[in-house]
Image (cartoon, rainbow, N blue to C red):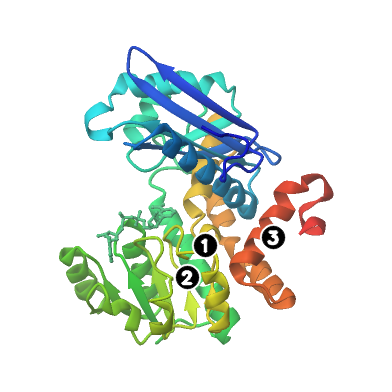
Amino acid sequence: MEFFTHPEFDSHEQVVLFSDKTTGLRAIIAVHNTNLGPALGGCRMWNYASDAEALTDVLRLSRGMTYKAAITGLPLGGGKSVIIGDAKKDKNPRMMQAMGRMVEKLNGNYIIAEDVNTTDDDMVNINTNTAHVVGLPVSGKGTAGGNPSPMTALGVFTGLKTALKFRTGKTDLTGVRVAVQGLGNVGFNLCERLHAEGAVLTVTDIDTGRIQKAVDQFGATAVGLDEIYDADAEVFAPCALGGVINDATLPRLKAVVIAGAANNQLERAEHGAAVKARNILYAPDYVINAGGLINVYYEYLARITKGVQGREEDSVKHILSIRETLDEIFTRAQRENLSTADAADRVAEGRFLFPDNGWDKAA
Ligand code: NAD
């Protein structure tokens, strides 16, 4: 298996393979970049078809976390870990404790968090052997932490309003039509906030119970899974799946703003330019959905400073700064004739590649 010539290798600082015979743990931790601080990123458990597939995933995901951490303005780098195995069959508390021992060996260079197929219970087990973990029960009243989804929704809501204002000049959501795809933890909370400020909602989900709740509580119009792309809306908010901005869906969208929580919304990188060509303002996913990351960082801060720092109000304030970050990205995209996706990457790179130059000068 190639490593330094691997297509997803991007000067990663550290990639470590771990195994534990007793529990059957096989894991890879990738630390992409720590110029701004320790690498924080989730631990994904997946039944990879091969070790090579696991390596590809961890290299790609850890790089993405560097960009996300840098753009949020947190003193964090990017990392990720993967555990190879079937979460339903292979996972057990002792395996997670072993994972904690592995994380501890990195001496705080990597902070582990939940991801696909890992839970807060897993983080508690990991915590038996390392303090470098987030996603634990909140340590005190007024302390940041807990379920990150409402915080992610707050960031998306703020970002959606920022994008709407930049694109249309509107500062009031009254009567603004928003199409929300996915009414899960983030999407439903987003609908609640939008409805409270007078937005008119069109929604879809594979779960008809959630749709009915949105119809009852917010007077939303329900449409079929595929019909959401044709909704007569100014804003499209993807809050379910990745890859939904693509050649097939883009010509159907009537929205002038795309602002939602889903990861990897653009099917391919070139869809960033395609969105721009249609005069749609896209709020880059990893910027607008960073509320959860910001929240877990403050949770970590609260724990390591024994509550001196890491207040919930500071976390909320930081999440609301997604507004300024998006404004910076949109302005730069306009000035340099870039897609907003490319502008976001450049702002992030300016921060983590040249931290000594000062972020603003570098960006
Ligand atoms: P969730 O699983 O709670 O909700 C997803 C919802 O989408 C579910 O209600 C599901 O039924 C629905 N769905 C699935 N397939 C669909 C389809 N084809 N069409 C319409 N709806 C469909 O997840 P979540 O925590 O709300 O996260 C939503 C998205 O935001 C995900 O892409 C996630 O990766 C991303 N995200 C979440 C967070 C967070 O803090 N939860 C943070 C960053 C990014």
Labelled pair 2, 1 in contact (Cβ < 8 Å) = yes
Query: Label 1: how many residues lie within 10 Å, few (<14), some (14-19) or many (20+)?
Result: many
Q: Position of residue 220 (x, y in %)?
A: 26, 78
Q: Looking at the picture, tell me which residue is in the foreground, 32 or 104.
A: 32
Confirm or deny contact between disc 3 and disc 2 (CB under 8 A).
Answer: no
Q: Residue at x 48, y 36 (%)?
A: 55
Residue on which the image places disc 3: 346
- Identify which residue is drawn at 38% across, 46% down: 147
Instruction: Categorize mark 2 by other alpha carbons within 10 Å: few (<14), some (14-19), many (20+).
Output: many
Quadrant containing ligand 1 reads: bottom left
Q: Which mark is residue 288?
A: 1
Q: Amino acid at mark 2?
A: Ala
Q: Is residue 286 above or below residue 197?
A: above
Q: Secondary structure at mark 2?
A: loop
Which comes before the other along the chain, label 1 or label 3?
Answer: 1
Q: Is residue 344 above or below residue 228?
A: above
Residue 291, given in percent of the width and then of the height, sits at: 50, 54
Q: Is residue 258 above or below residue 62?
A: below
The residue to which callout 2 is attached is 259
Estimate the spatial distance between the alpha carbons at disc 3 and disc 2, rounded to whole Å: 20 Å
Left or right of 180 on screen, residue 105: right
Q: Position of residue 309 (x, y in %)?
A: 60, 38
- Disc 1 marks which amino acid? Ile
Residue 15 visible at all: yes
